Amino acid sequence: ILREKGFGVEFPNYIVDVKKDPVTGDYTEAIQFQCLDRGGVRVFEGINFMSRNPVMTDVEMKAMHQRAKDAGMYPFGASEEQMHMVARRGEDEPKIDNSWQRMWHAIGVDKVLELLAESIEDGGR
């Protein structure tokens, strides 16, 4: 279990499955599950399929879905029908710096999210 921050909140990140290169032993794929409960209510649930390969074939994706299913993750949203592919940016593309991001920083949304994370972590004391 790793602790991860996102959207101003810190949550547990469970590494559910990994695939290794049979020659080098390097990790090539991973399946992660995150969830956050507060007061007995699940407020966040996330599933990530991650690959070092920027473009995955349908066969590779189906294999990841099967590993997620074998790990018991389908009830939490890991089926092909419940997930969507997030487009990757090219490595050579410029850093994203648009008017929305500048506005969020200017009005302090990033700082409010950090305060929210701290509040959640200390139980709202």
Image (spheres, helix red, strand yellow):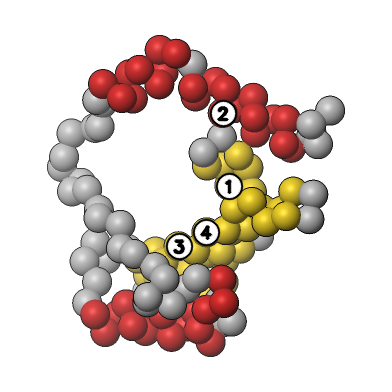
Q: How crowded is mark 3: few (under 14 residues within 10 Å), some or many (20 or more)?
A: some
Task: Look at label 4 and name its amino acid.
Answer: Gly
Task: Look at label 2 and name its amino acid.
Answer: Leu
Residue in the picture at 31% in, 25% down: 100
* Disc 3/disc 2 C-alpha distance (Å): 22 Å
Mark 3: which secondary structure? strand
- Disc 3 target residue: 48
| Residue 47 in the image: above or below residue 2 | below
Q: In this view, does 57 lie to the left or right of 21?
A: left
Residue in the picture at 24% in, 80% down: 58
- Disc 1 target residue: 4
Q: Earlier in the sequence, mark 2 or mark 1?
A: 1
Residue in the picture at 64% in, 24% down: 115
Q: Earlier in the sequence, mark 1 or mark 4?
A: 1
Q: In this view, does 2 lie to the left or right of 22?
A: right
Circle nearer the viewer, 3 or 1: 3
* Disc 4/disc 2 C-alpha distance (Å): 18 Å
Task: Look at label 3 and name its amino acid.
Answer: Asn
- Disc 2 target residue: 113
Mark 4: which secondary structure? strand
Residue 35 seen from this side: yes
Task: Look at label 1 and name its amino acid.
Answer: Glu
Locate residue 57, reporting x and y percent: 22, 77
Q: Are marks 2 and 1 in contact (CB under 8 Å)?
A: no
- Disc 4 target residue: 46
| Residue 65 in the image: above or below residue 122 | below
